[in-house]
Amino acid sequence: MNSVYTLHPIFDWTDEQVDRYLKENDVPTHPLHERNYPSIGCECCTTPVAPGEDPRAGRWRHLREPGDDGPKYCNINFSDGSGI
């Protein structure tokens, strides 16, 4: 059986290193980053992040907060048990 390796060349980069690379290489960034979406997933499962929150706090927020008025589930991530 052959082994397969996955390499992630920027795995251990800091946010500052990523930002510097993007600027130095003129890499376009998603416009939602400027609107407090540092981690972007699908439309219904991603919310903006408030100052001081973890950068990934906006991902699947509706799984952590009570109430039915939040974003609807996309059924891509089955972590809440309802996505079958």
Image: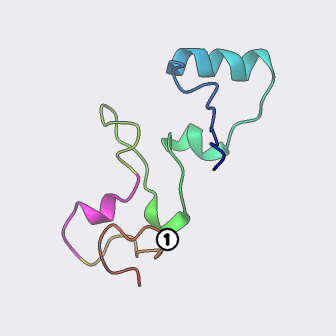
Q: Where does the magenta region start and end? A: 59-67
Identify the image quadrant of the C terminus.
bottom left
Helix, strand or loop under label 1: loop
The amino acid on which the numbered mark 1 sits, given as a three-letter code, is Ile
Q: Is residue 33 above or below residue 46?
A: above
Residue plotted at (48% across, 41% down): 36
Residue 53 vs residue 30: left or right?
A: left
Residue farthest to the left, as pictured? 66
Within the magenta stretch, is there residue 65?
A: yes
For the residue pair 49 and 63, the one nearer the viewer reads as: 63
For the residue pair 80 and 45, the one nearer the viewer reads as: 80
Name the image quarter holding residue 21.
Answer: top right
Within the magenta stretch, is there residue 45?
A: no
Residue farthest to the right, as pictured? 26
Q: Is residue 83 above or below residue 29?
A: below
Residue 56 in picture, x, y percent from top left: 40, 43
Residue 21 vs residue 77: left or right?
A: right
Residue plotted at (18% across, 69% down): 66
Residue farthest to the bottom, as pictured? 84
Residue plotted at (71% across, 23% down): 22
Q: Which residue is mark 1?
A: 76
Residue plotted at (54% across, 15% down): 16
Residue 51 in picture, x, y percent from top left: 34, 34
Magenta stretch, main secondary structure, is loop
How has the structure been colored for display? rainbow
Mark 1 residue crowding within 10 angstroms, few (<14) / some (14–19) / many (20+):
few
Q: Is residue 42 above or below residue 83?
A: above
Residue 76 in picture, x, y percent from top left: 49, 71
